Image: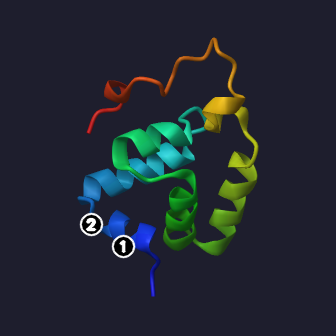
Amino acid sequence: MPKAPVKRFRRLPDDEQSRVIEMAWEDRTPFEAIETLFGLAEPDVIEIMRHQLKPASFRLWRRRVTGRTTKHRALRSPDVQRGYCPTQYKR
């Protein structure tokens, strides 16, 4: 049975579901931007990706995003401004 984040994700329209997954794959989109737009925190996005991707693809994605400075606002340089403006991403 899917967990609560996956159930919330499934209630989103198809185009927004695709956008969440696309933003999660993008290297320069922080998890905070996904949370701002869709109300899905980093652990929620991880659970959604675990459910939506094949196991090998999920492991590849996790290896890529774990500790990546561009995916976590707190680890970013203050010079990087992408992902701070909620209007940057079209719904």
Report the quarter where the C terminus lies: top left
In the displayed structure, 19 sits above or below 29; it is below
The tag on residue 7 is: 1
Report helix, strand or loop for mark 2.
helix
Q: Looking at the image, which is closer to me, 64 or 37?
A: 37
Residue at left offset 66%, top offset 31%: 74
Where residue 9 appears, as percent x and y from the top left, is 36, 64
How much space separates mark 2 and mark 1, taking CA atoms?
7 Å
Residue 42, x across and y down, in percent: 56, 52
Secondary element under disc 1, as helix, strand or loop, is helix
User: Callout 2: few (<14), some (14-19), or many (20+) C-alpha neighbours within 10 Å?
Assistant: few
Q: Which residue is mark 2?
A: 11
Q: Amino acid at mark 1?
A: Lys
Residue at (58, 72) in percent of width and height: 54
Q: Mark 2 is on which residue type? A: Arg
Identify the residue at horizontal 63%, vertical 11% (top origin). 79
Q: Nearer the viewer, residue 39 or 21?
A: 39
Q: Position of residue 11 (x, y in %)?
A: 27, 66
- The image shows residue 58 at horizontal and vertical percentages of 64, 64
